[in-house]
Image: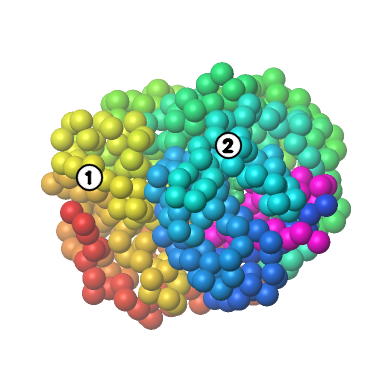
């Protein structure tokens, strides 16, 4: 059978590949997923699978590592390589065409099918919509096809991950895609660019039918086990009517605890009550910044502190746990401003607040703002802006180059206090939980990152994971990670976060 190897970085269920796999299998192809995190033999494993096509999904922060793997693969065997995801969609010119034969811009479900069919049947691959294809020395750039409504997509192939990876199967938390697209325009997000790209191409913000999601949940519950359902989309409470009908159905048929992302300014007591009744255990939302002016003017998020406090009160009243995501390192931000974010998180009674350093990805609105207002004295390439905080497995990787993302956690912003702001991002989550630490942390952030920074940064996440993880083996893993960071983490303490500034 004609075989497709799906390659991804993160050790988790990937919605894009689960849908593509279903479409490909329905058309007579065989598929298998290969996950990079924690797998040193990935190149050999893909090679042994003997795929006819390698299809990879890539995000900008991990593109260097992913292209490295693809380069290795190309050296071993010369099969067509197609790459898609946020990186190729937003930075098609930053692709290494020596190792790639085609890239996907935007949605890829049916572009992947057309490509696989064309390769299998030895047909022309150059005219496929959504693909840019290498032909001799030139790149053929095709237009975008219309948006496919989520209701028209097939049932995802859950077996792609849960039959192959026991660790994903035994995890009580399983992920379900409920919607795509977002109507807001936050300055740091790629959503706005995608929306522009898809103008006149169909309904950009689209939800699945509630019945469709219920069927998926039932299938996964009955075949693989389910303790928590994670409903993935940018904002589940965008369309109140849709959410009500989904919650009613979920309450009647499933009622397994679930987690989801919300916009806090669209939350109220009635909705929180309905969500709790349906089994909602926790919601996550972007608080992003505690200073209203910076939140509105720099991040382009139009909500005030009162709305955040009111939304959080509705969550607390209904005993819904909540986590927030926050950003430090904004243009013009002072340490006092950053502490306002810590303070607002404390006031709303968050269970866990995570803090990232603002990454100025080229082409985003915030990048343009920074460039025009003297915060960046030159233009940057996507390759230079890959200093994001990575996953825990990156931070704890034995291999030095795999850890490099974290060691270089920094900002390209040209601003006097940027080092202190970046340093504060390591401690902010802990500070939300323990105000008494403020004087110590204010002194620590004047120094250089060391293993204490890393430990303090991960501690709140570890505590939550230990609290909610039932598997003894996973608990032991967390404890081993804690010990390793505190006592053995190599290659971190001596370095100043290496900079290009
Ligand atoms: C879930 C998610 C994650 C998950 C898992 C990601 C994954 N690969 O599944 C986790 C938590 C790991 C994650 C981490 C991060 N994420 Co994220 N994430 C998302 C999110 C919310 C949804 C992705 C999703 O599942 N969509 C649904 C599926 C069906 O669609 P899709 O992934 O877009 O895929 C479609 C196309 O891209 C294309 N396609 C994708 N892959 C392929 C492959 C082939 C071969 C083909 C042909 C087509 C194709 O076809 C798919 C179907 O139409 C998006 C935002 C969004 N709304 O898209 C951000 C997003 C992708 N993440 C983003 C960022 C910045 C991050 C982090 C840096 C955050 C951080 N500070 O830590 C890290 C980076 C980690 C890394 N590996 O490099 C940015 C990407 C920016 C960029 N230029 O890469 C996005 C776009 C958010 C944003 N709006 O700015 N993320
Ligand atoms: S609400 Fe979330 S997904 Fe929507 S634009 Fe803002 S950051 Fe992006």
Is residue 306 in view from this perspective?
no
Relative depth, front residue between 324 and 96: 96
At x 41%, y 60%, the residue is 64
So how many labels did they put on this image?
Answer: 2
Question: Where does the image place residue 18, in percent across and percent down from the top left?
Answer: 71, 50
In the current view of this chain or complex, which residue is farthest to the bottom?
Answer: 488
Give how far across and how far down residue 455 sits, in percent. 38, 67
In this view, 160 is above or below 378: below
Mark 1 crowdedness (10 Å alpha carbons): few <14, some 14-19, many ≥20: many
Q: Which residue is mark 1?
A: 413
State left or right for residue 153 relative to residue 96: right
Looking at the figure, which quarter contains the C terminus?
A: bottom left
Q: Secondary structure at mark 1?
A: loop
Residue stretch rendered in magenta on the structure: 1-27
Is 97 magenta? The answer is: no
At horizontal 49% and vertical 60% (from top left) the residue drawn is: 99
Alpha-carbon distance for marks 2 and 1?
Answer: 34 Å
- From this view, report whether residue 424 is shown above or below residue 35: above
Nearest to the eye among marks 2 and 1: give it.
2
**How many other residues sit within 10 Å of disc 2, few (<14), some (14-19) or many (≥20)?**
many
Is residue 82 toward the left or the right of residue 160 in the image?
left
Residue 218 figure quarter: top right
Label 1 within 8 A of ligand 1 by Cβ: no
Work out which residue is located at the far front of the displayed protein and give it.
136
Q: Any atom of ligand 1 within 8 Å of the CB at mark 2? A: yes
In the picture, measured across the screen, residue 162 lies left or right of residue 293, that is right
Q: Is residue 28 visible?
A: yes
The image shows residue 197 at horizontal and vertical percentages of: 49, 28
- Location of the N terminus (image quadrant): bottom right
- Which residue does the numbered mark 2 point to in the structure image? 130
Q: Residue at x 36, y 26 (%)?
A: 300
Earlier residue among tags 2 and 1: 2
């Amino acid at each position: 059978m004609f075989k497709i190897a799906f390659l991804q970085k993160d050790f988790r269920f990937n919605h894009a590949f689960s849908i593509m796999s279903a479409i490909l299998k329905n058309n007579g192809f065989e598929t298998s997923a290969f996950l990079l995190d924690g797998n040193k033999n990935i190149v050999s494993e893909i090679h042994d699978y003997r795929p006819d096509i390698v299809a990879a999904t890539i995000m900008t922060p991990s593109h260097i590592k992913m292209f490295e793997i693809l380069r290795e693969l190309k050296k071993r065997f010369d099969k067509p390589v197609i790459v898609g995801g946020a990186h190729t969609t937003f930075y098609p010119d930053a692709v290494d065409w020596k190792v790639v034969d085609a890239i996907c811009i935007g949605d890829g479900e049916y572009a992947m099918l057309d490509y696989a069919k064309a390769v299998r049947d030895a047909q022309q691959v150059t005219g496929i919509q959504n693909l840019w294809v290498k032909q001799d020395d030139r790149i053929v750039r095709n237009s975008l096809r219309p948006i496919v409504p989520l209701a028209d997509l097939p049932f995802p192939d859950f077996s792609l991950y849960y039959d192959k990876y026991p660790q994903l199967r035994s995890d009580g938390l399983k992920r379900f895609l409920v919607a795509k697209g977002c109507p807001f325009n936050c300055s740091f997000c790629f959503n706005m660019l995608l929306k522009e790209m898809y103008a006149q191409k169909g309904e950009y913000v689209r939800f699945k039918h509630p019945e469709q999601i219920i069927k998926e949940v039932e299938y996964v519950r009955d075949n693989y086990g389910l303790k928590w359902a994670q409903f993935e989309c940018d904002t589940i409470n965008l369309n109140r009517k849709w959410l009500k009908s989904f919650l009613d159905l979920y309450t009647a048929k499933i009622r397994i605890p679930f987690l989801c992302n919300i916009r806090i300014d669209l939350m109220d007591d009635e909705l929180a009550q309905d969500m709790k009744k349906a089994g909602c255990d926790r919601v996550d939302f972007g608080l992003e910044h505690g200073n209203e002016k910076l939140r509105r003017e720099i991040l382009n998020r139009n909500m005030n502190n009162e709305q955040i406090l009111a939304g959080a009160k509705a969550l607390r009243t209904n005993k819904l746990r909540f986590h927030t995501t926050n950003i430090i390192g904004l243009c013009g931000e002072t340490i006092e401003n950053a502490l306002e974010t810590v303070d607002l998180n404390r006031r709303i009674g968050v269970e866990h607040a995570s803090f990232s350093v603002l990454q100025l990805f080229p082409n985003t609105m915030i990048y343009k703002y920074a460039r025009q207002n003297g915060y960046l004295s030159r233009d940057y390439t996507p390759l230079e802006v890959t200093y994001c905080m990575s996953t825990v497995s990156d931070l704890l990787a034995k291999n030095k180059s795999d850890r490099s993302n974290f060691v270089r956690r920094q900002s390209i912003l040209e601003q006097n206090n940027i080092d202190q702001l970046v340093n504060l991002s390591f401690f902010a989550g802990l500070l939300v939980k323990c105000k008494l630490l403020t004087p110590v942390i204010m002194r620590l952030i004047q120094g250089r990152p060391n293993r204490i920074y890393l430990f303090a940064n991960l501690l709140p996440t570890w505590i939550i994971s230990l609290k909610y993880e039932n598997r003894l083996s996973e608990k032991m893993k967390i404890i081993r990670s804690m010990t390793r960071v505190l006592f053995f983490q190599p290659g971190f303490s001596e370095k100043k976060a290496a900079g290009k500034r």
